[in-house]
Amino acid sequence: MAEVKKENWFVRTWGHICRYFRELRSELKKVVWSTPKQVLKNTLIVIACVLIVGVFVWVFDLVAQTLITGLIGVFH
């Protein structure tokens, strides 16, 4: 029975790396890239949402701080 010779580790690894980049390039051709106008619009929406949530958190923190300070003043 003949022994099957295994490829060198470096040869196998190089083959895996090459195959990875071939498949990567193939998949990147399928991507539908956003236009700069869409990117700007989405960025502005994200910034607006972050600001709105930040204001809500700030108001909640202010109300909670006032209530806690009031309770401490009542029971102190």
Image (cartoon, rainbow, N blue to C red):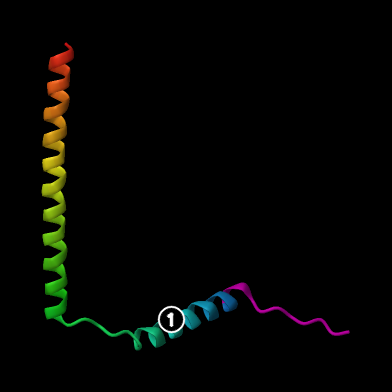
**Residue 26 in which image quadrant:** bottom left
Counting from the top left corner in percent of width and height, residue 2 is at 84, 85
Q: Residue furthest front?
A: 74
Is residue 49 shown in magenta? no
Residue 1 vertical placement versus 75 (above, below): below
| Relative horizontal placement of residue 40, taking residue 33 as reference (left or right) | left
Along the line of sight, the residue nearer the viewer: 10 or 22: 22
Counting from the top left corner in percent of width and height, residue 19 is at 50, 83
According to the picture, the residue beneath numbered tag 1 turns out to be 21
Counting from the top left corner in percent of width and height, residue 71 is at 16, 21
The residue sitting at 14% across, 47% down in the picture is 56
Q: Quadrant of the C terminus?
A: top left
Name the amino acid, label 1: Phe
| Relative horizontal placement of residue 33, taking residue 55 as reference (left or right) | right
Along the line of sight, the residue nearer the viewer: 73 or 26: 73
Counting from the top left corner in percent of width and height, residue 7 is at 66, 79
The residue sitting at 17% across, 83% down in the picture is 35
Magenta extent: 1-10
**Residue 10 in which image quadrant:** bottom right
**Residue 13 in which image quadrant:** bottom right
Residue 22 vertical placement versus 39 (above, below): below
Q: Residue furthest right?
A: 1
The residue sitting at 14% across, 28% down in the picture is 67
Along the line of sight, the residue nearer the viewer: 10 or 65: 65
| Relative horizontal placement of residue 32, taking residue 50 as reference (left or right) | right
For label 1, count other residues whose C-alpha is less than 10 Å away and answer few (under 14), some (14-19) or many (20+). few
Q: Secondary structure at mark 1?
A: helix
